[in-house]
Amino acid sequence: MDSLITAAARALAAGDPLDALNYIALRDDPPALALRGIAMAQLGDLGRARMLLRRAARVFGPREALARARCMVAEAEIALVARDLGWPAKPLASARTVLERHADLANAAHARYLAIRHLLLIGRLEEAERLIEEFDPSPLPAASRAAYELTLAGIAMRRLKTAAARKALARAERVAAKTGIASLMAEVKTAAEVLDRPSAQLSAYGTVRTLRLDDIEALLTSQTLVVDACRHLVCWSGTEIGLVTRPVLFALARALAEAWPRDVPRATLLVRAFRARHADESHRARLRVEIGRLRRALAAAAGIAATSDGFVLVPHRAREVVVLTPLTDDAHASTLAVLADGEAWSSSALALALGTSQRTVQRALEDLAVDGKVQAIGRGRARRWMTPPVPGFPTTLLLPAAVADG
């Protein structure tokens, strides 16, 4: 490797893409093309970066499998930054195998880290955690090690393990400071601020107050019966009862919890659960059926007693009943939560992350765009959606991974 390539690589490692381009901007040999691609990625021109990396991979000869594997890893990282979450995992796994065979442990570890980060973004936390258990991050260079710690913090926040998240962020801060890369240090600082922002609202006895993540963690492990409207769960003493796929039951549970210790009239429950303004006997019969189903679902935590006017929630051992709600009552709060990372997302990537259809996401984006909450960039297949991070927005509780694992 010649001196200009070496100097450009060192500049890129230090987070200085402009200095790197000064060395290689006019060169078209494969190593220079690959480094130019990485430089363009650092400057934010992801389309140009991908084109240069693919061109470099084609130009590398058949005996240069190691160089092509490195290009594949770089392209996979660009796909993550561009939120192109539908890229196939097999090429990255094949590239990692080549890197391991050639004893390029640093890039092999980076490839494994990218696979973990991809799983985190699409909400597959259990698979990401399994890969982490088998992963040795020691070969990672400093910048990648800081990003790895950020990934650990992200998983911990989605699991509502704030102590583990703070430790990971502290490690990320130390490593980022050693690199001297301003953008990396800013990313770590922004992630750390999430832990100190309000993340949800607590409603009880007619009053509302905001909670941080550590407050929510303590609440969900306490003796309080919590109806979690962020993730559609009912929680008590560390036990979670998932109602994500049962919206009628959750609507009834929330209505009963909001009124506790008072009862809720049947007419109110019919409106909340079925939107029935003029109830007939069939609505009342369906309400009795759904209340019976809710009784069975909540049997471990609470009962539901009939009163002369309606029904009342009767917790077995909980001292009180509260409702946890998002800071925003927007109907598309989950979509906003994903977009709150400030990156540009395609509608297909959002659908993959949220676990819903692309058309559903497109309708949500159209509604949010009308309200000025998101904006589109580009046209056709190149269209991306983004919004600046909203201060205090519940980016952790509303992320799809938390919902999916509930």
Image (cartoon, rainbow, N blue to C red):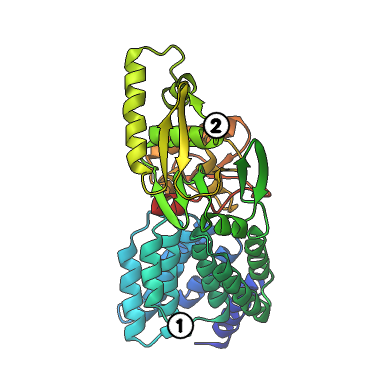
Residue designated by label 1: 106
Residue designated by label 2: 262
The answer to which quarter of the image holds residue 374 is top right
Q: Secondary structure at mark 2?
A: loop
Residue at 55% over, 36% down: 261
Q: Amino acid at mark 2?
A: Arg
The answer to which quarter of the image holds residue 61 is bottom left
The percent coordinates of residue 298 (x first, y second) are 38, 43
Nearer-the-camera pick, 313 or 165: 313
The percent coordinates of residue 357 (x first, y second) are 37, 39
Q: Is residue 191 above or below residue 66?
A: above
Q: Secondary structure at mark 1?
A: helix
Q: Amino acid at mark 1?
A: Ala
Q: CA distance from mark 1 to mark 2?
A: 61 Å
Nearer-the-camera pick, 15 or 272: 272
The percent coordinates of residue 321 (x first, y second) are 54, 43
Residue at 37% over, 12% down: 280
Nearer-the-camera pick, 3 or 334: 334
